[in-house]
Amino acid sequence: MIFLTSLVIRPVIDRIHAVKIANREISQDETFSFQMATAITDLKNLQSDCLFVRYTDEMDARDKWYTLHNKENTMFKKTLALGLLLGFATRAIAADDPSIKGPTREGIQRAMKSHVAQNTLADRYIIYDARTGHLDRLVFESLHAGIVKKGDFFVSCADFVDGKGKKYDVDFLVVPKDGSFHVLQGLVHSIDGEKRKYHVEN
């Protein structure tokens, strides 16, 4: 804008200056000085306009980058949320067999409660950890509602915590026997979310 204004005003200034020269109001040295000062001013105005255009272009490019970056972040968050949702849904479906119901489900849950009670000493559930070779003493928290069938066993789990606050997920192998259900063994399935693989199918 400054540069365009100078293009309009400059011819007027030159005309006034020419009249002054004709009337002998200023010397040739003053004319040269005036022309140099005017040229420097025009150069500064041109530089200011170029810098303004460059600044505007850079701001436009930065705005476009931020817009694209925000869109990519939003898409990534949506994709991550969908993946987690599907993962939880799959885990929920895999952790429970809805066909196991009625007296069977109730009997399995009773067997697990009885097993925990019978293997508790001084308010600590006693279980041998075959991987570490240690005898763990855990505080019982709650039974899981999910039950599945693996090979010859019904499998369900419960949450425990040790004296250091570590979270234990213990799986119980349950079988029907003499008209009721019994827990054959408890297996440490995960500690603080770190799962262990085991196989009970033939």
Image (cartoon, rainbow, N blue to C red):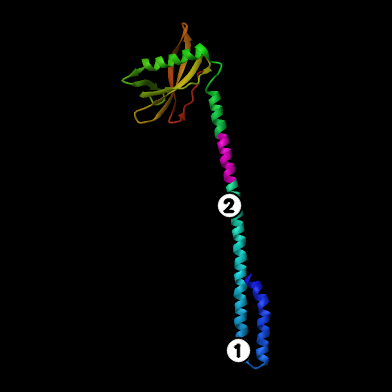
* Horizontal and vertical percent position of residue 50: 62, 68
**Image coords of residue 17 (percent x, y):** 65, 86
Q: Is residue 16 above or below residue 174?
A: below
Q: Residue 159 at x, y = what percent?
A: 42, 24
Q: Which mark is residue 39?
A: none
For disc 2, the marked residue is 66
| Residue 158 vs residue 190, the one in the foreground | 158
- Closer-to-camera residue (202/155): 155
Distance CA(mark 2)–CA(mark 1): 53 Å
Magenta residues span 72-83
Q: Please name the residue shown 58% across and 52% down the image.
A: 66
Mark toward the start of the polypeptide (2 vs 1): 1
In this picture, is 13 found above or below 193? below
Q: Which disc number belongs to residue 30? A: 1
Q: Can residue 23 be seen in this view?
A: yes
Report if residue 191 lies within the magenta region. Answer: no
Label 2 packing within 10 angstroms: few (<14), some (14-19), many (20+): few
Residue 134 in sight from this viewpoint: no
The residue drawn where x is 49% and y is 23% is 198
Choose top left, top right, bottom left or bottom right for residue 49.
Answer: bottom right
Asked if the residue under mark 1 is in contact with the one under mark 2, i.e. CB atoms within 8 Å, the reply is: no
Could you tell me which residue is drawn at 60 percent across and 53 percent down? 65
Name, please, the residue furthest toward the left.
122
Q: Inspect the image, locate mark 1, and give the three-letter code of the amino acid beneath it.
A: Glu
The correct choice, above or below, for 87 with respect to 105 in the image is below
Q: How many labels does the image show?
A: 2
